[in-house]
Structures are given as structure tokens and as C-alpha cells.
Image: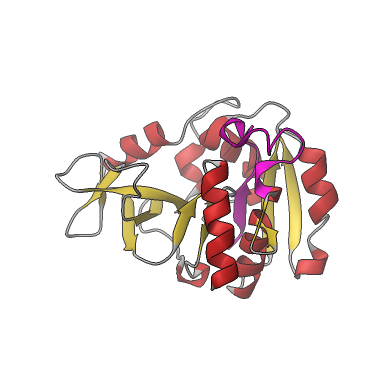
Amino acid sequence: MKAMILAAGLGTRMRPLTDHTPKPLLPAGGKSLIEWHIERLQQAGFRQLVINTAWLGDRLEAALGDGSRYGVSIEWSREGTPLETAGGIRRALPLLGDEPFAVINGDIWTDFDFARLHEPVGLAHLVLVTNPEHHPNGDFGLDSRGLVRDNGKSKLTFSGIGVYRPALFYELADGEAKLAPLLRAAMCHDAVSGEHFTGAWWDIGTPQRLEQLDAYLRAN
């Protein structure tokens, strides 16, 4: 299975840290956020990675190269202008191929074992986490059959980790598009499964959270 790391965002909430450094290259615990992903993906058996870029993408490419020093192969999907999550994935489909692929947000940190990711029964499989303090209402519900729902009394937060079939994106035109509407449409057809991960997970949305993650990693 190939894996895509989403790294094309502008990182506006992280300024001034991202004025000259793309968000996935920000360091925590002695290495950049995206290097944590690459190393954990490699350890889980992923060898072919796709990374999308926009803001300061040349710096990402200069830092990571072709991935050989990490034991992986990196192909680059250059967007120019950020296309949002679904638009970025749609643009990268020629690099991702016809089989299901994993996608990981470049601005999270987690100890989730990527080797657990598997081909979805439907169109998508999402990893959900317990709602953090900054997102108390969550995103999606998870029913007793392991299907993700857009409703429910108790919602969880989408972790930014998922596995998708290319068919989920086939009807999208090339351009900017969000992922949530596609997922919600697929949920109506029982085509999105999920799991609740209770391990370590950080959404690095502010400089303060980056500082907290750095302290956590250095202590552990």
C-alpha cells in the first residue's frame, strides 16, 4: 500500500513559525513532524510515499529529497496553490495508483501503528480519536458495526489518518475540494468504516501545542 502525507497547507495559525518554514518541517523532539511520519511509515512496511506541497514546497523537497536516506521512495505532488484535502488527493491520484492508499495529515503527531491500516471494505476507513480540549464536539460518530456516521450522541474526532479507495475521488474535478462532504456522502451508503484509537495523538494547530509536544517527546 502507498501512503500520502498531506503537507501543502499554509500553516497560518502557526505564524510566525511558518513564515519561512513549512509546517511539517517544524521540529519536535529532535526531528521534524514529517520525519516522524516517514520513519514510522517505513517501520510499518510502507516504502512508496507521496507528499503534496504548496507553501514553501521547495524547502520540503530540499529537506527530504527522494526519501532514500529514510529507506523509502518519495514522489512529489506539487499544487502551487493549496487544493484542500480532497483536492490535493485528487491531484495526486496518478501517483497513488488504482489500489487503496493511506493518507496522513502532516501536522499531527501520533504513536498509532500504521501497520494496522488495512484495505477498507467500503470506500474509506478512518481512525478516530477521543475529542481533544480544543475540539470538544468531535466530527463523526462510530456505531456498533464499526461504521462511521455523521450523527450520533457521542462523536469522536477524525485523527487525519485514513485509508481510501481511489473511487471516492473519481467524480471530483481537478481543483480545490474538501474531504468531509465526500465522506458524508459515502456514509449515507454505509461505505465508511472506522476505529477508535486511544493512544497518543496531537494536532499541532498552534505554536503552544508544538511546544507541548516537544516537551512530551523529550520527556518520553
State the image coordinates of residue 121 (x, y, percent, origin top left). Answer: 36, 58
Helix, strand or loop for the magenta stretch, by majority: loop
The image shows residue 137, relative to residue 97, as above or below, that is above
Q: Is residue 4 left or right of residue 191?
A: right
Q: Is residue 150 left or right of residue 180?
A: left
Q: Which residues are magenta?
A: 1-24
Residue 199 or residue 186, whichever sits in front? 199
Give me the residue at 66% from left, 48% from top.
Answer: 24
State the image coordinates of residue 98 (x, y, percent, origin top left). Answer: 58, 51
State the image coordinates of residue 118 (x, y, percent, origin top left). Answer: 45, 65
Residue 97 visible in rendering = no
**Which quadrant of the view contains residue 197?**
bottom left
Q: Is residue 83 left or right of residue 67?
A: left
Q: Is residue 3 left or right of residue 112?
A: right
Residue 55 or residue 163, whichever sits in front? 55
State the image coordinates of residue 17 (x, y, percent, origin top left). Answer: 68, 39
Q: Quadrant of the N terminus?
A: bottom right
Q: Quadrant of the C terminus?
A: bottom right
